[in-house]
Image (cartoon, rainbow, N blue to C red):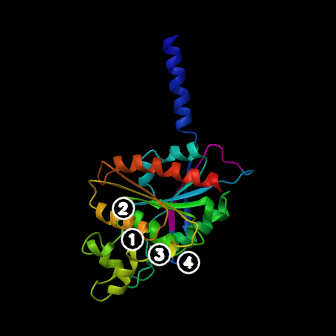
Amino acid sequence: MKKLIFTLGTLLASQYANAFNVETISIPSEHTKEIHQATVILPDSYNSENTYPTVYVLHGWSGDYKVWNENTSIANQADIHNVIIVLPEGNYDKWYIDSPIKEKSNYQSYIGIDVVNYVDNHFNTKKDPKQRAITGLSMGGFGAFNIALNHLDTFGNIGSISGGFDPKDFRFNWGLEKVFGNYDENTTFWNNKAIKNTVHKLIFKDINITIDCGIDDFFIDSNRELHQKLQKLELDHDYSERPGGHTWVYWNNAIQYQMVFFKNKFIAN
């Protein structure tokens, strides 16, 4: 009997763990003049009679649209919170900006316009910005804030995990100069892309904010700096530091906290 109960329990757990539906879609872009793939995770409850909040989750440097699903349990979050999760392509190292020097490298507009419009037109989403969130890890954490700050009427919820919020502090790393340009020649652009210098645009905006970074992460200082700037501006936000570094173990844990945060905000609206 014990063996039967164990087997039945294992079977039910396995069925639940795989109840969500993972799809790979192709999204044409007016802003990059390419077709990019994306991963869409639909909750088991998904049907044509209901609409669902959407969470866009961006990958980090050297990643792609597959890595979040391959390295974490993020797909389970679609079932747990009854939301659609979208994992778009950021093209390895393009930093989710509209580049002033690299032609067709407009991933800020690609995500903020092309991807959102495609998902809203092809899936049963709640189209209210308050029912739409964007977050990401590392390069994607910076990207989530950069995209949201340039599309304030699109995203009502912003998050970041281990975000690199001030690119100029690392301008010789991770291909930054390929899309930002030479710092000395494009100083204004670099400085304007530091999130602390543009986050004031959130004043008087009804946007929910959550930030998470490990205390051993090399981006911890820029996270603390942004946290302090938000406090100075008296902008409500959720801020977390926990033991951990720039690792998938940390990100797998952190995304679960952020999904709870987003779901609570979806319900409140």
Tag 1: residue type?
A: Trp
Pointer 4 local density, CA inside 10 Å: few below 14, some 14–19, many at least 20: some
Name which of mark 4 and mark 1 comes first in the sequence: 4
Instruction: Give the label, 3 or 2, closer to the camera.
Output: 3
Residue annotated with mark 3: 200
Tag 3: residue type?
A: His
Residue 8 found in image quarter: top right
Tag 2: residue type?
A: Ser
Determine the CA span between mark 3 and mark 1. 21 Å
- Furthest-top residue in view? 1
Residue annotated with mark 2: 138
Pointer 3 local density, CA inside 10 Å: few below 14, some 14–19, many at least 20: some
Residue 95's label in the rendered image is 1
Determine the CA span between mark 4 and mark 1. 18 Å
Determine the CA span between mark 2 and mark 1. 10 Å
Residue 219 found in image quarter: bottom left
Residue annotated with mark 4: 30
